[in-house]
Structures are given as structure tokens and as C-alpha cells.
Amino acid sequence: MNADPSLRSVKAWPFEEAAKVADRLAANPKPEGAPGGALFETGYGPSGLPHIGTFGEVARTTWVRRAFERMTGLPARLIAFSDDMDGLRKVPDNVPNKAMLAEHLGRPLTAIPDPFGTHPSFGAHNNARLQAFLDTFGFEYEFASSTDYYRGGRFDAALLRMAERHEAVRTVILPTLGAERKATYSPFLPIHPETGVVMQVPMEEVRPEDDLLVWTDPATGRRHGTRITGGGCKAQWKADWALRWFALGVDYEMSGKDLIDSVKLSGQICRVLGGTPPASFTYELFLDENGQKISKSKGNGLTIDEWLHYAPPESLAHFMYHAPQRAKRLFFDAIPRAVDDYLGNLDKLRTQPDPANPAFHIHNGSSNDPGSPIPFTMLLNLASVINATGPEMLWGFIRRYAPDVTPESHPILDRLAGYAVAYYRDFVAPTRRYRAPTDLERTALADLLQVLRSLPEDSTAEAIQDRLYEIGKRHPFATLRDWFGCLYQVLLGAQEGPRFGGFVALYGIPGTIGLIETALARESPAPETPAA
């Protein structure tokens, strides 16, 4: 790929981040013999299953990696690193054979039998789930196992360097610890030679020249000598992150707001080892419908499976792209707008590949997907009006509205029809509330009724929308927004929606006339009685 330095001026955060990586490489050239280009990393704790945050971090990192390649013309790799040598701290709630797992607490995940019985270890099972998850979305990555890297010697030189600078590393971490932990802290966690448990104990001796850690088992009082290299030990969390950056030469890694302090400390340790921390990016965390931080343990918020039950994965990617450094509510009511925002940018990408367009990054620069001639929110309104039980009911209206459109020619529209029915059934139908029109609205609706009766049934959405504007202007609404709010609230039982002229064209003028006649038959709300 040819370099395009002009992309530095694009007002899009992936290119701004890519410029940081390019500048880091220019200031810190790779050692002779090291792979060229840039190394991007994402991390994964395999004690649980991949989740919506996993998708967001890998997707965002992928967009920065691609932006870097386009900007510099240099190759870039993404490794998905699994911390599978971590000790199991507690038994997850969503697994079988909990009693068996409880017998292995403290051991590395890759040294624990798989409770599902499908893989050599619990770590291998969850690693396979991670890779299947990433493969489902077509991410390009190299999988990396902490266990393989420690046992295979990839970290040996860095571990010995950490042993040589043991006290300097401790000096970075000790100010962040309480008195009890300060007395025992070491960045090294030896693997117990008899129990296989990842031990958190003080180091009595750290002897890099002998490749040796000396420590005492507090349960038995027995002293042990453990090799520093070859998987005999692993590093504690913040030191482990720094070790990875130093040993692998990581150029870029993003993380959540909750890890800001860890990034700073790991960066300091990386410098103590003689390395340069990667360029970093801090993204905000997601909030639930009540503005509380989403937590896997609480189960609040929205899971990735739930999102994908009601909308395509590209809409989730679009949601992840927008303003990653701003906290956003991740709940069901975010889905319709995310879908329509994505569809709008997909249409723009097809006609003009603008690097500032989110769809440019989602589709790696271009797309021939014809998109959808009908917004998702309009399909939801249609599903609501006809009480749709299946996508074929929507297609009856779609074919009349756009005769040349078929499920085969517009596959995303076909998928959206199915999503719309599911979303309507689970979220719209239970909460739909129609209200009676006010006297002002009743007069305007009667006016609209006469106008629609005078229009040809094949009138375009634009022609109908123009007449709607005219009606709104000749009645004394405070704003046109009030008039269009009336149409959605009174006729469709919704708070808002897309251009109403498009809905009328899709549903049909005769059907819309029927909606208005039904609404006019409702009694107007009683006027408020003035307070005495």
C-alpha cells in the first residue's frame, strides 16, 4: 500500500491515533532484525467469555491499524493477547462442573481441566471462544497465548531484565500499595512446583545471574527455588503489561478509562526495563439505561448477542466508532438510531469514499453494498402499524413502495425487515401508547385527511412531505416539530420517527387515511381546570 501523508489532516480519530503511532516509530526505530512496521495489541482475560467490550476494543484498534497502513504505507500487525497464565481467582457463574473448578483455584487457566469437556484446558476452551468470536466479525489478528509465550521463552530476556531491575520496578509500584502489600510485593509470581498454584509471596532472593527466585511456601514453611525463565514464574498484572510491551515492542494499545492509572504505572515500568511504552488511547466506558457503568458481574446494560438479535453487526461497529472518549448509554433504545446512522453513512461511502466517514473505517475504505432505501425506524413504524409477525408482511409493502427492490438485490434490507419485526415485538408493542389529538391537532389532521384524499396513490415521498409542511405551516403550531410529533404520537403511538412523508409512501395513502380516521374518532383530552 502506498503512503498517503495527507491523511494526517483528516478529522477522524483513527487517523489522529495513527499519526501518534507513526510519530512513535519515527522517534523509536525498531531494532535491527526486528519485524518492520507497527505492532498493535489488544488484551483479553480468558476467565470469562468475550463480550461487547471485547468487540469494541478490537474493532477500534483495527480501525487505527488500517489508518496507520494507509497513512504510512507500512505494514501493521494486531495481536490479540490472552492472559491465560493468570491464576483462576473465583469460579464463574456460567460454567458447568463448578465443584471441579473450585479444586483448581489459583492455578493458571491453561493448567485447569475444561469444565465443558471440549478442550485440553479451561484456558484453551475460552481462547477458542475468543478466536471464534473474533473470526465471526472478520477481524484480522494473530492470537497470542501468555502461557505459550512464558513457557516458550518469548519473555525470557525481558524477565531476566526485570530481575536485574527488581528494586527499581518495586519502587514504581510500592507507593500505590497499602502497608501490608508493600512488605511483600514483588513483580514476580512463581508457579508452585507441587501444587501448580500461581503464588503471591515475597521474594527472599532474586538472582538473575542464576536464573533463580527463592521464596517460602507460607502453608508449609518450605523454601523453593524457581526458575525465572521458561514458564517457572509469571509477572504480576501491571508488571506483566509492561513486560509484554518491552519484550514484543508493542507500538499501540488502547484501554478503558478504568485503567488510566495502570497504563501510567506500566509505562513507568516499561521505561525502567529500558523500553518505550506504546502510544495509548483511553476510551470511555459504557453506561446502562440509568447512567450506571455497565458491569459483567451486575449483568446490566446490553450484551452483544442481544444487540445482534435486533440489528446487524455493522450498526454495532458504527455505535462503537462514534465519540469513543465520551460515555454513552448502551441500551436497547440506542439500536434504531445506530442502524439508521450506519445506513446513512453507508450510502455516502458508496458515492464518495470520504476517510472521515465512519463507514469508511467499518468497510476498510469502500463498499458496493446497496444499503437500504428504507430507514430502519420506518420499518419499525410499519411493523407497528400492521402488527407484523414476520418479515414477509413488511415485504408486501416494500415491493409496492420500491418494485425493483428484492431480498436478493438488497440483502441488508431483508435482514433489517427481520430485525424490525423482532424489535417491534419485544420493545415497541409492549410500550406503544396512542393519544387523542388536541383540538388544534384535530383540525390539522382533518386538513391532512382532505389533502391525502386529493393526492394520487402513487405520490412520491417528497411530494407528500411537501404537503405535510404546508399543512403544518397553515395551522398555529408553535413549531413544525410539534406538528410532526403529533403525527407520530397520535397516528403511530411513537414519540418520533423518520420523515413522515416516506412512511405514508411506504404504508400507502389509503392506509394512512384509515389511521387518521381512527385517530379522529378518539376523544380529545379534557381541558385542564384552572386552580382555584
Image: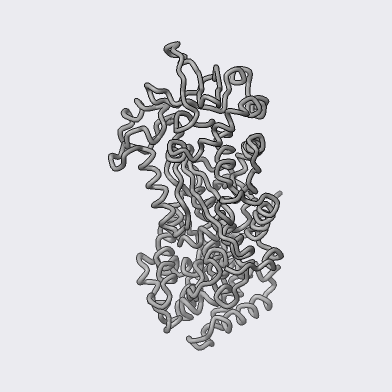
Q: Name which residue lies at 66% across and 43% down.
A: 276
Image location of residue 150, percent across then percent down: 46, 36
Q: Residue furthest top?
A: 221
**Residue 226 falls left or right of residue 526:** left
Front residue of this view, candidates 136 and 320: 136
Front residue of this view, candidates 55 and 332: 55
Q: Measured along the vertical axis of the image, is residue 35 above or below residue 446?
A: above
Number of labelled discs? Answer: 0
Q: Measured along the vertical axis of the image, is residue 202 above or below residue 77?
A: above
Residue 47 visible: no
Image location of residue 76, percent across then percent down: 55, 57
Image location of residue 476, percent across then percent down: 70, 72
Give the quadrant of the N terminus. bottom right
**Residue 323 falls left or right of residue 420:** right
Residue 404 visible: yes
Q: Name which residue lies at 62% across and 37% down.
A: 266
Displayed quadrant of residue 87: top left
Image location of residue 17, percent across then percent down: 65, 55
Displayed quadrant of residue 485: bottom right
Q: Measured along the vertical axis of the image, is residue 153 above or below residue 200?
A: below
